[in-house]
Image (cartoon, coloured by chain):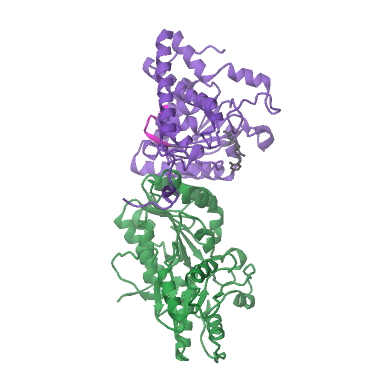
Chain colours: A purple, B green
Amino acid sequence: MTAPSASLLSADLSLSLYKTLYMTRRCEETIVRIYPEDNMKTPMHMSMGQEAVSVGVCRAIGGNGDVIASYRSHATYLAQTEDHGSFFGELHGRTNGTADGKSGSMHLADIPKGMLGSTGIVSAGIPVAMGAAFANKQKSPGRVAAAFFGDGATDEGVFWETLNASCAMKLPMMFVCEDNDLAVHTRKSERQGFNSLVEVVRKYKCDVYEDDTNDVESIYALTRKAIEKMISSGQPAFLNIKTYRYLEPCGTMQDSDAPYRRAEEDAYWKGRDCVALQRKRLLASGLAEKDLLKVEGDINAAIEKSVAAAKAAPHPGADLLSYGVFYETP
Amino acid sequence: MRRLNFADAINECLDQEMARDPSVFVYGIGVPDFKGIFGTTVGLAEKYGPNRCFDTPLAEDSMTGFALGAALKGMRPVHTHIRADFLLLTLNQIVNMISCHNYMTGGHTAVPLVVRAIIGRGWGQGAQHSKSLFSYFTHIPGLKVVAPATPRDGKGLLAAAIRDNNPVVFLEHRWLHWIEGEVPEESYEIPLGVAQIMRPGSDLTLVATSWMVIEAVHAGKILADSGINVEIIDPRTLAPMDMDPILASVRKTGRLLIADYDWLNSGLSAEIAANVGAACFGTLKQPIERIGFAPTPCPTVRTLENHFYPNAETIIRTVEKMLGRPPMDLTGVDFFSHERRFRGPL
Ligand SMILES: Cc1ncc(C[n+]2csc(CCOP(=O)(O)OP(=O)(O)O)c2C)c(N)n1
């Protein structure tokens, strides 16, 4: 296990980042445990292993921004909203979910909380964040918009269209590339006709940042820097954050033995697990383990409550099938 | 009443909506340039500045997703395209993202945006600059689709589209832009989803869309001179469609001809025919007839273009056949063409 550097953040913030990291991880561990019950009839694209990206970036945005996630949306949704009640409600297809169960795991949203949506179409959320950035620039200066996407999404045309347009239009738009090197089972080296995405993006009129730490505090600090620069320079930020997906591309199972996996890579990344790293840092900073166990126990209990509430909530009735095709102005 | 051409009516609507509501903005490729999309966007950039009326990179896909993001943050984008064919590059955003965003987020999300595009015949526009694509959009739940045919409707329906809290695809036939008609000066809305009877009649119901409304009104006059009275209905909003006046008319006339400005197969005309067939089965005196584009790509050369597009003459001949009348002599009748620009009255 890699040893974490000492925290440069306040003790409160360090702990708070850990709580969100732990919560997202625990939510997904819960999914892994109860998915076989077959109550959650929705595909699962697990964030496990990658949580530090969403938690670090969303905390740096700190409520003063809007985000849109890919279909690998769990960590982003939970980091942006801290709401595992509606999360489990939606995954269980219940009326206490984000959309009465009609969206499932791939379209999680909470617009008042700045979670504009998640999309099952690779890359399609990226321009939506650009539109939000445009609106924010006019209506709430200082407020940013971020698109989360995988490295696979950068193969798509709309990624490049949006990179070009947002740079040309000087929008407070943050591109967050969750670079796990994989699109399903295919490596970047097989998909990319250039050597380095960040080197290409550097030619655009934006500021480019890279992270290869899997450390939530580094990602948080880097994003803060990016946001401050973006606000002063008025040009987009591009964050390329290296990370690693633990589970199969879609589903809740391990696939470490699959032919596309590499044992050394797996061991390397699991040796710098983002949750364990932050936990170790807190303990090293003097936090008593029993206090941390108490924090974790409280989160576990709250998640169990959310799962129970989801299971107790009703499924939507047939009357809800046609509700929401059009928006009815209240 | 004051007369205005369709392009100026659209321009006046955009101006009034931008003045009324600072969240309205108008953008797209070529929008602020000196030609201003057939004159419809002329002067807006000068009056409202570059944040409210602006050009974009050539990136239809991305700039459509942009509209969704802006709409979710409380703005009212009007994305404008000089040809509807270019909308094919926006379908991922319109169909996968925009049309279902409210549904996927629980039904509480306003998605107020308008996609304006110019459709149809110019001269020699060929296979990639002339489409209508009505049924591409009417097929999709969650979209409203509007195709006005008069300057007054253009202005009022566009105002309603901009104020609507749902995504609206607004399709304007190119030749309409020079048509003149009476247009109130003040701002007004014509509600979406309400059809209009363009001419009352008792012999046959003629439902026409977009430019075919102009052709139908022309045909209706010529037919009336020889004693045939067709009732012409312009649905104006193609989705959701106001079927009641169409059904009421068919119950009265027993006959239906649909003149769509699009291909027939799997098209809007088939949808209207299916609805009327189901609702008026007992009262129909003969099979429903449809006219529309020839089932080919649009050819460029004029001689073939004239066979590809239906017009008032096609309507007259079809009506005569349906009613068992001999073909009338149409020598000397002025049919519309790009060169013979028709300016009114409507
Ligand atoms: C437009 C589109 N093409 C293909 C797919 C099928 N698909 C789902 S996930 C995926 C790989 C995406 O990889 P990446 O963007 O790197 O995200 P990651 O899964 O690594 O988070 C593909 C090809 C899709 N959902 N959307």
Against B199, residue A247 (above or below) is above
Left or right: residue B51 compared with residue B132? left
User: Residue A228 sits in which quadrant?
Assistant: top left
Left or right: residue A161 compared with residue A11? right
Q: Quadrant of the C terminus of chain B?
A: bottom left
Against B112, residue B284 (above or below) is below
Left or right: residue A297 compared with residue A256? left
- The answer to whether residue B341 of the structure is visible from this angle is no
Find the residue positioned furthest to the front.
Answer: B282
Question: Which x, y percent locates residue B145?
Answer: 45, 61
- Count of numbered tags: 0
What are the residue bounds of the magenta stretch? Answer: A59-66
At a point 55% along the width and 74% down the height, the residue shown is B290
Question: Which x, y percent locates residue B20?
Answer: 29, 57
At a point 37% along the width and 59% down the height, the residue shown is B44
User: Residue B53 sits in which quadrant?
Assistant: bottom left
Which quadrant of the render holds ligand 1? top right
Reply yes or no: does residue A60 show up in magenta: yes
- The answer to whether residue B196 of the structure is visible from this angle is yes
As rendered, which of A242 and B221 lies closer to the eye? Answer: B221
Against A95, residue A209 (above or below) is above
At a point 48% along the width and 83% down the height, the residue shown is B219
At a point 45% along the width and 23% down the height, the residue shown is A23
Q: Quadrant of the N terminus of chain B?
A: bottom left
As rendered, which of A191 and B291 lies closer to the eye? Answer: B291
Question: Which x, y percent locates residue A271?
Answer: 58, 16
Against A90, residue A48 (above or below) is above
Question: Which x, y percent locates residue B330?
Answer: 54, 90
Reply yes or no: does residue B275 show up in magenta: no
